[in-house]
Image (spheres, grey):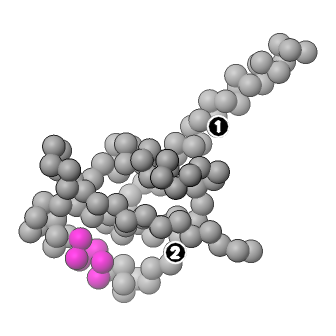
Amino acid sequence: MVFLVVLSFLIFLPQALVSQNQFPKPVGHVNDFADVISENTGCQIEAICIEVKQKTGAEIAILTVQTIGDQHDTDYTIRLLEDENWQLGERGKDNGVLIFKLFRREN
């Protein structure tokens, strides 16, 4: 019996760890996965982010999501920024900005 419990734990633990670290792939500077930013506003924000990057080298990304599971917002964003797809700014300059908003929708 103990063997089955340990085996189940070993089978399902890697899946739980992977699912916690699965982040949406960025699609540009505006990543509105919660679908709360209008298309027009998104285009305006995207243009501003591009202009800031061209003029200063700083990189801005906006991310909205509907859920992060049971993770704390801060922990989620720290791990997100460690993901190779979400590394912002120029290496060694610390000039990247992430604007993150979690929208939990009521059913």
Percent coordinates x, y for residue 17 in the rendering: 59, 35
Q: CA distance from mark 2 to mark 1?
A: 26 Å
Whether 46 is among the magenta residues is: yes
Residue positioned 37% across, 42% down in the render: 82
Q: Tag 1: Cα neighbours inside 10 Å, few (<14), some, or many (≥20)?
A: few
In this rendering, the answer to whether 94 lies above or below 31 is above
Q: Is residue 16 left or right of residue 29?
A: right
- Judge whether residue 28 can be spotted in this image: no
Residue at the right extreme? 1
State which tag comes first along the sequence, 2 or 1.
Answer: 1
Q: Say which quadrant the N terminus sits in.
A: top right
Residue positioned 32% across, 63% down in the render: 61
**Magenta-highlighted residues:** 44-49
Q: Amino acid at mark 2?
A: Asp
Q: Is residue 22 left or right of residue 48?
A: right
Q: Say which quadrant the C terminus sits in.
A: bottom right
Residue positioned 86% across, 14% down in the render: 2
In this rendering, the answer to whether 100 lies above or below 72 is below
Q: Is residue 11 left or right of residue 72?
A: right
Q: Which residue is mark 2?
A: 35
CB of mark 2 within 8 Å of CB of mark 1? no
- Judge whether residue 38 can be spotted in this image: yes
Considering the numbered disc 1 on the image, is that residue within a helix, a strand or a loop? Answer: helix
Q: Which residue is mark 1?
A: 16
Percent coordinates x, y for residue 85 in the rendering: 35, 48
Q: Amino acid at mark 1?
A: Ala
